[in-house]
Image (cartoon, helix red, strand yellow):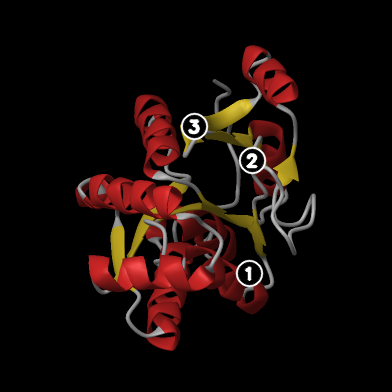
C-alpha cells in the first residue's frame, strides 16, 4: 500500500453507514470551502443512472483495479457489497502538496487502513469523522426511498450498517444527521477547528512572529 508523504493540506476521512447522508454532506462541504476538494474513488461497481465517470467515481474494470493493487497505487482499498473501491495515493498526494484540503468518503475498512498507516508513520494529516443516521429504522427508510437497491442488497446494507456503527469508537468526531442543515453546521465546525489547530498553524505563526518567537 502506498504511503502518505509530507504535505500541507488536511485529509478529512468521512465514514458512514448507508442512509446517513454522507455523499450529500461531503458535496455541501466542497461547495462551501473554496480550498476543499472531494477525492474521487476508483470502483469496479457498475455505473448507476445519473452517475458520471470521473465525477462520481472512476469506473474501471476488475482487471485494471487489480493491476493498481499490484502496483501499490492505493492509499486504501476495500471490497464492499461485492464491489471494490479504492483511493489513489497519487491523486491524494497531488492535492495535499498544493496545500488543498481533501474530503474522502470511504467505508470503515478503508478508514482503518489509513488510520493504521498514519499511526505507524506518526503523521497528523488525517481527521476521522463518522456520520450516523438518527436510528437504524430511519437508515432503512432512507435506503428504501432511494429506490436503487433490491431487497437482498437492502438487507446487506443494513447488516453492514450495524457492523460499521460498532467501529465509531475510534473516530475523532461523531455527527448524527437528523437534520441536514444542523449536521452540515457541525461538519463545517470540525473542518474550521482542525484548520486552526496549533500544530497546523505553527509554521505560519512563526513566519509572522519570527522576532517575537526567537
Find residue 19 and report its image quarter: bottom left
Residue at 49% across, 32% down? 79
Q: CA distance from mark 1 to mark 2?
A: 24 Å
Which residue is the site of mark 1? Answer: 30
Q: Position of residue 83 (x, y in %)?
A: 56, 35
- Please tell me how many numbered marks the rendered image carries: 3
Q: Position of residue 164 (x, y in %)?
A: 29, 47
2 and 145: which is toward the camera: 145
Which residue is the site of mark 3? Answer: 79
> Which-is-in-front pick, marks 1 and 2?
2
8 and 39: which is toward the camera: 39
Q: Earlier in the sequence, mark 1 or mark 3?
A: 1
Which residue reaches farthest front?
151
User: Are the residues flagged by discs 2 and 3 in contact, CB closer than 8 Å?
Assistant: no
Task: Determine which of the numbered discs, if any, sits on residue 45 in the image.
Answer: 2
Q: Earlier in the sequence, mark 1 or mark 2?
A: 1
Q: CA distance from mark 1 to mark 3?
A: 26 Å
- Please tell me how crowded label 2 is: few (under 14), some (14-19), or many (20+) other residues with Cα within 10 Å: some
Amino acid at each position: 500500500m502506498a504511503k502518505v508523504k509530507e504535505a500541507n493540506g488536511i485529509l478529512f476521512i468521512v465514514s458512514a453507514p448507508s442512509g446517513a447522508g454522507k455523499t450529500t454532506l461531503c458535496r455541501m462541504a466542497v461547495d462551501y470551502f473554496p480550498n476543499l476538494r472531494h477525492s474521487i474513488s476508483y470502483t469496479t461497481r457498475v455505473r448507476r443512472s445519473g452517475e458520471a465517470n470521473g465525477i462520481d467515481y472512476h469506473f474501471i474494470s476488475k482487471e485494471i483495479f487489480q493491476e493498481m493493487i499490484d502496483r501499490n497505487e492505493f492509499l486504501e482499498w476495500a471490497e464492499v457489497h461485492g464491489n471494490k473501491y479504492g483511493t489513489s495515493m497519487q491523486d491524494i498526494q497531488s492535492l495535499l502538496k498544493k496545500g488543498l484540503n481533501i474530503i474522502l468518503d470511504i467505508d470503515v475498512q478503508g478508514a482503518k487502513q489509513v488510520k493504521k498507516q498514519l499511526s505507524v508513520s506518526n503523521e497528523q494529516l488525517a481527521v476521522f469523522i463518522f456520520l450516523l443516521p438518527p436510528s437504524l429504522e430511519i437508515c432503512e427508510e432512507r435506503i428504501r426511498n432511494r429506490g436503487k437497491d433490491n431487497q437482498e442488497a437492502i438487507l446487506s446494507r443494513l447488516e453492514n450498517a450495524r457492523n460499521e456503527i460498532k467501529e465509531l469508537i475510534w473516530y475523532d468526531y461523531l455527527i448524527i444527521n437528523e437534520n441536514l442543515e444542523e449536521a452540515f453546521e457541525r461538519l463545517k465546525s470540525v473542518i474550521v477547528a482542525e484548520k486552526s489547530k496549533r500544530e497546523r498553524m505553527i509554521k505560519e505563526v512563526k513566519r509572522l512572529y519570527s522576532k517575537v518567537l526567537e
